[in-house]
Image (cartoon, helix red, strand yellow):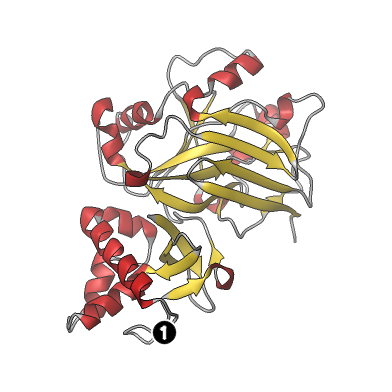
């Protein structure tokens, strides 16, 4: 299933699913409609509990929520129209009618990896990290496929970083590596946008990584059952029509199961936690000449099975 958070008209962001035809289905309203047709008198309350409107709450619902969402999706596909549901609200939209935000909007954590691709290590000559190197971003950085990347006035070196991200699907502590994938709810594209001059100046990455809109992700969160092997995915990044990153997740130094287990030994994993697994070679600051992004550019990332994420660069406004 392709999970999204969408906005339509006056609605705040709500949980949805993207179909193969790129139609957007409001899973909560569709489930309401299904329950009402089945004669459930408290259809709205039950739908809110089983298929909530926020993706973090949805992930926390576990298998019951996934089952409800699958039933809602099947019901909406059979309806085949944009008719009003049981609550008098539409639950089926064309992609062009809605705005897509980050598929996960309110995670407890955004954990990022550095120096985690072998081709990056070969290209830069940095030492192989003896353990995963992690840092964090804040939720203000999250944005979606219909949002711009904001070029802050504070930097002159705006960099891109194509990354595979996974999202935790259930709570876990001290997870053994052999069971780690059981704790992954889904996968998505992540762009770890960076102000490279600031990270160099500060000699640490927090300031240069946490500006508004510095973590575009999406266009959807692909459920883990549809991607059993995240360790062999082609990934590419373009700025405008220039290919600047071209790799495969086979190049990961520390793979997804290792990262799940490692992080669970530091803190309790929570549903909705985002983990961006690092970026391959081809970074702007290491190219000669450098290939930093400029206002008006479009940065596009494609990862096999996870779609395409494209964001335009715009100047910071007052």
The quarter of the picture where residue 46 lies is bottom left
- Is residue 81 positioned above or below 281 on the image? below
Left or right: where does residue 146 sit relative to residue 55?
A: right
Name the one closer to the observer, 97 or 62.
97
For the N terminus, the quadrant is bottom left
Q: According to the image, label 1 marks what residue? A: 83
Name the one closer to the observer, 267 or 312.
312
Residue 160: tell me if it is visible: no
The residue shown at (26%, 72%) is 47
The residue shown at (54%, 67%) is 95
Left or right: where does residue 68 sit relative to residue 300?
A: left
The quarter of the picture where residue 38 lies is bottom left
Left or right: where does residue 111 sit relative to residue 169?
A: right
The residue shown at (44%, 74%) is 92
Total labels drawn = 1
For the C terminus, the quadrant is bottom right
Q: Position of residue 257 (x, y in %)?
A: 34, 29
The residue shown at (38%, 63%) is 54
Q: Residues within 10 Å of mark 1 (few under 14, many from 20)?
A: few
Q: Position of residue 226 (x, y in %)?
A: 36, 46
Q: Secondary structure at mark 1?
A: loop
Q: Position of residue 299 (x, y in %)?
A: 68, 46
Q: Position of residue 123 (x, y in %)?
A: 65, 17
């Amino acid at each position: 299933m392709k999970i999204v958070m969408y906005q339509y008209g006056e609605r705040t962001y709500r949980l949805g699913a993207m179909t193969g035809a790129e139609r957007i289905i409001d899973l909560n309203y569709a489930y309401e409609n299904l329950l009402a047709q089945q004669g459930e008198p408290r259809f709205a309350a039950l739908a809110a509990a089983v298929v909530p409107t926020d993706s973090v709450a949805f992930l926390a619902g576990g298998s019951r929520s996934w089952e409800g969402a699958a039933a809602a999706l099947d019901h909406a596909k059979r309806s085949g129209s944009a008719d009003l549901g049981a609550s008098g609200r539409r639950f089926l939209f064309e992609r062009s009618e809605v705005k897509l935000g980050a598929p996960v909007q309110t995670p407890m954590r955004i954990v990022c990896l550095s120096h985690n691709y072998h081709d990056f290590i070969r290209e830069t000559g940095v030492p192989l990290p003896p353990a995963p190197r992690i840092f964090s971003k804040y939720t203000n950085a999250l944005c979606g496929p219909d949002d711009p990347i904001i070029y802050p006035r504070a930097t002159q070196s705006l960099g891109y970083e194509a990354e595979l991200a996974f999202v935790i699907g259930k709570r876990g502590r001290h997870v053994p590596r052999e069971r780690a994938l059981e704790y992954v709810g889904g996968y998505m594209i992540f762009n770890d946008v960076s102000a490279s001059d600031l990270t160099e100046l500060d000699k640490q990455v927090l300031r240069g990584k946490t500006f508004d809109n510095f973590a575009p992700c999406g266009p959807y969160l692909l459920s883990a059952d549809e991607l059993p092997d995240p360790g062999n995915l082609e990934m590419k990044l373009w700025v405008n029509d220039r290919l600047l990153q071209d790799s495969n997740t086979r190049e990961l130094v520390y793979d997804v199961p290792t990262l799940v287990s490692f992080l669970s030994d530091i803190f309790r994993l929570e549903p909705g936690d985002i983990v961006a697994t690092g970026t391959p070679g081809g970074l702007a600051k290491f190219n000669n000449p450098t290939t930093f992004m400029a206002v008006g550019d479009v940065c596009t990332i494609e990862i096999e099975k996870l779609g395409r994420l494209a964001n335009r660069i715009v100047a910071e406004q007052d």
